[in-house]
C-alpha cells in the first residue's frame, strides 16, 4: 500500500464523485481511498472562483509513500496525588485541565458560571427580555466566551502544531465536523460548540476530573511564593498548583491577583465598534455575485495603517451571523459577534477596532488596575447613553461625516438600536483612526460604505498582561500559572487552548 499527495482546482460545488474521478484520472488508478489534507477557497479572480484541494491518496497501485506523519502531542503519564486547581472553563482552562488529568493528576476545574444548557437559557432570556444575568452571559459560563461565538479555529501563533492537532482531534472526537482537520479557515459555529463543550466535559469527568460550576474564585493563600489554598464561593481547596484562565472579562479576578502580588503590566490593546452589513453586500464585494454554490458566505479580513499611529483592523468576522450583547457586568454595554455553523443569516458583522495604549487613552501613565477601571468606565458610558442594553448605532457614512439623521435601520442585534453619535461616545484618537481606516476599507471593498456601526467593541484584546515565562508560570512564583486570553498572550480559541496545553505540559515535565 502506497500513498501520494495530489492537488486539484475544483468547482465550488464539486461532488465527491468528481474528486474521485480526478484522482483516478491523474494517478491512473482504480482501487484507492483518500483523505483531504487541505481545502481553501481561491477567490482572487471573481470569474474563476474555485477550491484548492489537496488529498492524500492510498492505494496498492501506488509505489512508495509520500505521506508525512503529523506531529502528535505525547502526554507523559505521571500518576500523582498532587492536587491541581484550574480556574475557568474556556479553551485555555479546559484543555489545560484535560491534559493534566490525562497525565494522571488530581484535577479540579472550577467555573464561575453554569453548565452550557443553563447558560444558553439565561442568554436567550437576556436577549428576549433585557434581563441581565451576572452568572451566565456571553462572557461567563461553561466553555467561556468562545462557546457563543463563530467558533473560528484559525490562529497566527507559531510553534503550536502539536497542540493544534490535539485540539482539533479532541473537537472531532467530541462531535465537531471532520472538515476542521483540513479547512484553511475552519469554524464550528455556536450551535456545534454548545454540544462539543458538554461532550468534552464528560470526557474529562470520565478520566476522574472534577468539574464544579457556579464556583467563583475569590482569593488565594500564598506562602513563600507558593499557592497553598484556593478560596472560592463554594469553599476552600488545597492546591499544589494553580492554573488560572480568566478570559478577557474577569476584571475582579485580575485585581485580586494584582493585590496578591502577581505582577501585571499595561500593553497595547484595541477598541472600536461592530460593523454590520447585509451578507449580500459582502458576497458581491468578494465574489462579484450574491451567492456562490458550495460556499456558505463570504468573509473578509481588512487592515489599515490609518494615521500611522494606531493601526485599524477588522476582527472576529462573522459571516451570516449576528451582533450580540456581550456585557460581562450589569450596567455595562458592549457588543460582539456570533454565528451558527451554516452561516446562513442575512447579515455579516466584524469588529472595527483601533490599537492604542492605556496610557494614551488616559493621557497619563496608568497602573494595570487603572487601565481596567478606565475601560470599564467606557463600557458603562455606553450603557448610560442607551439607558440599558440597546446598542448605540449609526451608519458608516454618518460616522465619517460626524453628523447623522438619527434614523433606525435593520439589524441582527436582538435588543434594539439607539441612534447615537458614536464619534462622540468613542475616545477621540480611536474615532480619528477608525475614520481613516474605514475609508481604506471602502476603497478595498465595493459597497462597504453601505453598512452600519454598532455599539462598543472592547474585548478584542486585554489592556493588561501578566509577567510570566513562556510556560505561563508567573514571575516570582513557583506554582501559579496564568494562561489564555486573560494572560495577555493569546487570543481566540486555538491560541488560548494551546497556551493552556503548553502550561500543562511544562508542569507535567517538571513533576
Image (spheres, rainbow, N blue to C red):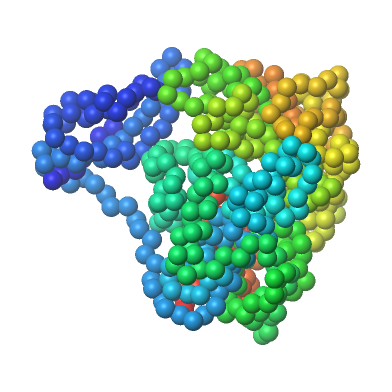
Task: Decide if residue 174 is on the left or right side of residue 144.
Answer: left
Quarter of the image where the N terminus is located: top left
Residue lying at 68% horizontally and 53% vertically, measured from the top left? 140
Which of 446/172 is in front?
172
Left or right: residue 337 compared with residue 74: right
Is residue 151 visible from the viewing direction of this image?
A: yes
Give the side of residue 509 with respect to residue 31, left or right. Answer: right
Seen in the picture, residue 62 relative to 118 is either above or below; the reply is above
The answer, for residue 432, to whether it is visible in the render is no
Give the answer, above or below, for where 362 lies relative to 16. Answer: below
Q: Which residue extends farthest bottom?
A: 224
Residue 431 figure quarter: top right
In the rendered structure, the answer to whether residue 155 lies left or right of residue 485 reads left
Q: In this rendered view, identify the residue nearer to me: 193 or 497.
A: 193
Residue visible at 78% across and 38% down in the picture: 129
Q: Position of residue 63 (x, y in %)?
A: 11, 42
> Which residue is rendered at x = 13% and y = 31% of the image?
30
- Counting every numbered tag in the picture gives 0
Residue at image coords 44%, 47%: 175
Residue 15: name its quadrant: top left
Q: Position of residue 90 (x, y in %)?
A: 59, 55
The relative height of residue 49 versus residue 103 in the rendered view (above or below) is above
The part of the image, by quadrant, that contains residue 227 is bottom right
Say above or below: 36 vs 252.
above
* Residue 476 x/y as whole percent: 65, 76
Amino acid at each position: 500500500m502506497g500513498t501520494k499527495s495530489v492537488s486539484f482546482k475544483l468547482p465550488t460545488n464539486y461532488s465527491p464523485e468528481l474528486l474521485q474521478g480526478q484522482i483516478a484520472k491523474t494517478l491512473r488508478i482504480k482501487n484507492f481511498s483518500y483523505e483531504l489534507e487541505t481545502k481553501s477557497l481561491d477567490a482572487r479572480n471573481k470569474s474563476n472562483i474555485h477550491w484548492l484541494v489537496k488529498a492524500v491518496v492510498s492505494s496498492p497501485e501506488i509505489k512508495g509513500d509520500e505521506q508525512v506523519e503529523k506531529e502528535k502531542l505525547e502526554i507523559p503519564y505521571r500518576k500523582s496525588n498532587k492536587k491541581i486547581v484550574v480556574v475557568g472553563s474556556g479553551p485555555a482552562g479546559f484543555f489545560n485541565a484535560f491534559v493534566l488529568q490525562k497525565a494522571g493528576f488530581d484535577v479540579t476545574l472550577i467555573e464561575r458560571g453554569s453548565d452550557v444548557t443553563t447558560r444558553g437559557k439565561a442568554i436567550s432570556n437576556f436577549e428576549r427580555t433585557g434581563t441581565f444575568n451576572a452568572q451566565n452571559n456571553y462572557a461567563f459560563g461553561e466553555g467561556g466566551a468562545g462557546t457563543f461565538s463563530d467558533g473560528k479555529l484559525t490562529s497566527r501563533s507559531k510553534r503550536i502544531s502539536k497542540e493544534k492537532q490535539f485540539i482539533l482531534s479532541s473537537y472531532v472526537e467530541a462531535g465537531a465536523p471532520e472538515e476542521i482537520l483540513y479547512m484553511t479557515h475552519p469554524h464550528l459555529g455556536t450551535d456545534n460548540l454548545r454540544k462539543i463543550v458538554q461532550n468534552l466535559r464528560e470526557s474529562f469527568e470520565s478520566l476522574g476530573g472534577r468539574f464544579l460550576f457556579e464556583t467563583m474564585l475569590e482569593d488565594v493563600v500564598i506562602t513563600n511564593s507558593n499557592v497553598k489554598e484556593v478560596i472560592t464561593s463554594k469553599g476552600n481547596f488545597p492546591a499544589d498548583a494553580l492554573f488560572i484562565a480568566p478570559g478577557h472579562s474577569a476584571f475582579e479576578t485580575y485585581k485580586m491577583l494584582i493585590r496578591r502580588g502577581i505582577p501585571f503590566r499595561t500593553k497595547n490593546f484595541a477598541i472600536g465598534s461592530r460593523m454590520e452589513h447585509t451578507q449580500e453586500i459582502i458576497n458581491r464585494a468578494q465574489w462579484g455575485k450574491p451567492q456562490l454554490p458550495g460556499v456558505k458566505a463570504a468573509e473578509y479580513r481588512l487592515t489599515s495603517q490609518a494615521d500611522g499611529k494606531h493601526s485599524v483592523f477588522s476582527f472576529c468576522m462573522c459571516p451570516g451571523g449576528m451582533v450580540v450583547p456581550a456585557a460581562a457586568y450589569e450596567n455595562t454595554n458592549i457588543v460582539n459577534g456570533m454565528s451558527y455553523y451554516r452561516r446562513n443569516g442575512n447579515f455579516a458583522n466584524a469588529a472595527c477596532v483601533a490599537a492604542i495604549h492605556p496610557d494614551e487613552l488616559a493621557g497619563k501613565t496608568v497602573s494595570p488596575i487603572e487601565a481596567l477601571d478606565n475601560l470599564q468606565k467606557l463600557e458603562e458610558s455606553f450603557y448610560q447613553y442607551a439607558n440599558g442594553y440597546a446598542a448605540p448605532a449609526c451608519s458608516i457614512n454618518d460616522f465619517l461625516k460626524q453628523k447623522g439623521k438619527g434614523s433606525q435601520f435593520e439589524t441582527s442585534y436582538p435588543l434594539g438600536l439607539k441612534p447615537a453619535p458614536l464619534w462622540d461616545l468613542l475616545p477621540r484618537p480611536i474615532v480619528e483612526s477608525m475614520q481613516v481606516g474605514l475609508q481604506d476599507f471602502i476603497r478595498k471593498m465595493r459597497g462597504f460604505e453601505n453598512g452600519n456601526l454598532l455599539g462598543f467593541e472592547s474585548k478584542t484584546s486585554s489592556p493588561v498582561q501578566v509577567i510570566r515565562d513562556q510556560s505561563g508560570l508567573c514571575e516570582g512564583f513557583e506554582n501559579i500559572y496564568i494562561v489564555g486570553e486573560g494572560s495577555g498572550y493569546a487570543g481566540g480559541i486555538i491560541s488560548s487552548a494551546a497556551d493552556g496545553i503548553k502550561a500543562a505540559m511544562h508542569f507535567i515535565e517538571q513533576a
